[in-house]
Every structure is written in structure tokens, then in C-alpha cells.
Image (spheres, rainbow, N blue to C red):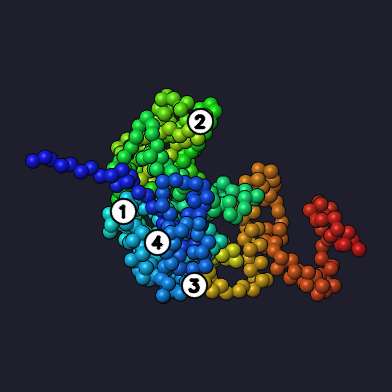
Amino acid sequence: MALSISLPSNMDMIVKIGVFGVGGAGNNAVNNMITSNLEGVDFWAANTDAQALDHALTSNRIQLGATSTKGLGAGSHPEVGKGAAEESMSELLSAMENLNMVFITAGMGGGTGTGAAPVIAKAAKEKNILTVGVVTKPFHFEGMRRMKVAELGLEEMQKYVDTLIVIPNQNLFRIANEKTTFADAFKMADNVLHSGVRGITDLITMPGLINLDFADIRTVMSEMGKAMMGTGEADGENRAIKAAENAISNPLLDNSSMKGAKGVLINITGGTDMSLFEVDEAAKRIGEEVDGEANIIFGSAFNADLEGKIRVSVVATGIDSEHFIKRTKPDVSYQKPENIITRPQAIDTTTYANDSVTESEEQQQVSNAFIAPKPAEPEEYEFQNLVNDQEEDSEDNTSFEHTQQPAAEALTDKTKEAKPFSLFSKVTSSFAHKNTSNDDKSQKQPSKEDLFDIPAFLRRKGNQ
């Protein structure tokens, strides 16, 4: 009896990677990747907006919720996008057939991307497909409501994807300038997805010094949660070090650090002139940023198009929330309103007469003033502020007066009893001056020494 062994065909052994662009932002990302001639990947565009779907450059198009939305979009309602994806589930599952890895790209904050992307991710996971989410967060100028919707969408995506990469659109200002067009700015964000997909496909398909298989990639990216992805390219002197540093300092990614990464995938690609020493340099530079316990999988490939250059791609996965760091000043605009206590400028805390007011009482006063500020009378408010300013000035100048004027004890009783200067007292004294009687004018005139302390224009007025 002869033993018959059947081997899988070459087509069955090829790793199949698909990219699903969901919603308007996702469709645009797919179009940009197609324009850049990325090979070895199948593209799908999924949208509730039939008109926007017609502009997709891929022939693989899925109209989500054709019956429920009638091709008019989700109207910025995530629940509509979710229902539309569930309605079109049979088409989505058919598109995922035979795929080994799926990238799902979408913009969080709208209706279709926020609602449908998690549904598609869940379907992919149930088919045991390695699922990676690459999503964007809104600009600050898009408002608080859209940001809250985006955060809810991110939480939902996190439940189903193996790895999630977040790109805040606000970070585009880090690399854009006044001449950067709106379209070019979004292409920069889409390039993060493009570089990540290309880095993985190059590892699998390109011949090189160290080849990786799909099982290695699954080991690093499966069930790893939040991740960061970066690509750097350089030429000339120290090109390996420069490319590695550019890869680990991608300014577009969500503020994060590689220190807490559980898995790291490194791909170093170059022309035939790339030396082993340069590969070692780049790998060591990235290793300096990663915890010693991280699972590092390294690969290197040749690419004839990179003659004279070196490209380094890094995917760091399993980054805990405690390793996400702020590169800029804390932004309180995303905090819940009830957690924000803003001290209004119209409230001067120095006017509190009772020093025994507790912190909670003061906080309640400030909160009440923030919610429903009560207008204060201008004269009284200005008077109190000026009195307080005068008191503070007098305290600051105490030591100066004692050292420079030892004869201060010889001041007259009239000078000692003088009230602090204020606009209110000045106005009051001016009215009192007009109503003074002749008896007041017969009072003792000031001495010549005292006149030196009186401004010249007042001395002239007194001599008239």
C-alpha cells in the first residue's frame, strides 16, 4: 500500500492580508494606500454613504445597511453605523474568507466608523483572524461631543482587536506647517497605516538575511492590546541609527512609551549595500528603548528600491496604560465637566474676609460662581481690590521703610491714621473738598518740609 501525501498548493501557503476602510476616514485611508502602490494586500471599502462609496478606488465595496440607511449615511450616530454593519454581516464575512490578517482602519467620532468598525473587528476575531485596528481621534476643534463619542468607540474596538493603534489627528500639528494642505495632512496620518502594513508584508514576502513567518507576527501581535507603530528611513552617514530613531519617535502616534511593551517586531530593510554592522546598530538602538523582558522578533530584508538607504519599521505591542506618557502639557479639555473646577477671573480670593473658610466651602463658592456668577457692584469690587493691593504693597515694603527711614516714628498722628489709598476714597475726598467750609481753610498750612511730599501740581493749586 503506497502512502500518499498531499501538499498544499502555493496559493494556500501565501499569507493573505486584508485592509478594511470603514466610513469616510477609512475609505480615504484605503484610497491613499492604493495610490501609493502597496502590493500584497487586498482592500475593501465599507460605508453607509453610497455616494462616498462610489469614490473608492477599490472594486471591493460593501454598502453597509442599504435597507436601514438607504445609502444616506449614519448621520453621526454610532448606533446607526452598528446596526448597518450587523445588517450587512453576510457580505462582511464573505469578504473575510481565507484571510489570515485584517487591518481595520476608521475615524472615531462619527457614525459609521465608530459604530461599524467594532462590529467588523468582532466578526474577524470570531473567524480566528489576526485583527489590528488603526484608528484616528478627532481634532480638538471638532468639539467635546465628538471626542466623547470617539472615546466610547475606542473602548468598544479594544474589546475585539488583537492590537489597537491610535492616531490623534491633533498630532498632525506637530509635523505640519502653515503651508501644509488639509489633504496632505491626512495623508501623513494614513502613512502610519501604510508603513505598518508594508513593514509586515516585507517581512513575509521579501527575501533577506533573516526571514520571519506569519506565526512570528501572530506571536507578537495576538491579544496584545494597545500598540505603537513607526517607520524611519535614512541615508548617508549613520543612516542605520537615524532610521531607528525616526522609527521609535513617530510624532503622530498616541502619546506612548515603548518601555512597557510586551512584544516588539523589528524589520530592517535596505538595498544590497546594507551591511551586517548597520543591521546590528539599528537593532541595538531599538533594544535600548525596550524592557529586557520583552519578546523581540527581528527580521531583515533586501529591497532593490532602497539602494543607498535603510528603512526601519517597529511594532511595539502590549503597552499598558501606565506607560502612556504625555509629550505636551496636560489637556483638561477632555476631562468630564464635573471634574473641572475653574476659578473665574471675576472672583478675587483675597476679598474673602473670613480666614476660617474651609477649603470645601471655598471650592463650593467658586463652583457656584462658575455655574451662575453673580455680578458685583463695580465701585465696591474696585475699592476692595485696590485696598488689598495697597495692603500687600505696604507689607512688601515694610523692611525697606525701617532700614531707609529710621525717623518713621516721628510721623504725625494725622499721617499714622491715614487710610489706604483707593479710587473710592479719592473720589470721596474730591467731593468733600468741594463742600469744605471757610473754617477748614483757616486750618494750619503745611510746613515747607511737608510740601516736598506733595506733588507739584497740588502745591500750585494750594497757592492759588
Q: Is residue 111 left or right of residue 426?
A: left
Mark 2 vs mark 1: in front: 1
Secondary element at tag 4: helix
User: Is 360 left or right of 183, judged from the image as shown?
Assistant: left
Q: Position of residue 29 (x, y in %)?
A: 49, 54
- The residue under the point 46% across, 74% down is 70
From mark 3 to mark 4, how far is it between C-alphas? 18 Å
Packing grade of label 2 (10 A; few <14, some 14-19, many >=20) is some
According to the image, label 3 marks what residue?
Answer: 72
Q: Quadrant of residue 345?
A: bottom right
The quarter of the image holding the N terminus is top left
Separation (CA) of disc 4 from disc 2: 39 Å
Q: Amino acid at mark 4?
A: Ala
Q: Residue furthest front?
A: 1
Callout 1 secondary element: loop
Task: Determine which of the numbered discs, if any, sits on residue 307 in the image.
Answer: 2
What amino acid is found at the position of numbered circle 2 in the picture? Glu
Residue under circle 1? Answer: 98
N-term-proximal mark, 4 vs 2: 4
Give how far apart the Cα atoms at labels 3 and 2 are.
48 Å
**For mark 4, what is the residue?**
117
Could you tell me residue 136's position as x and y percent?
A: 47, 56
Three-letter residue code for mark 1: Asn
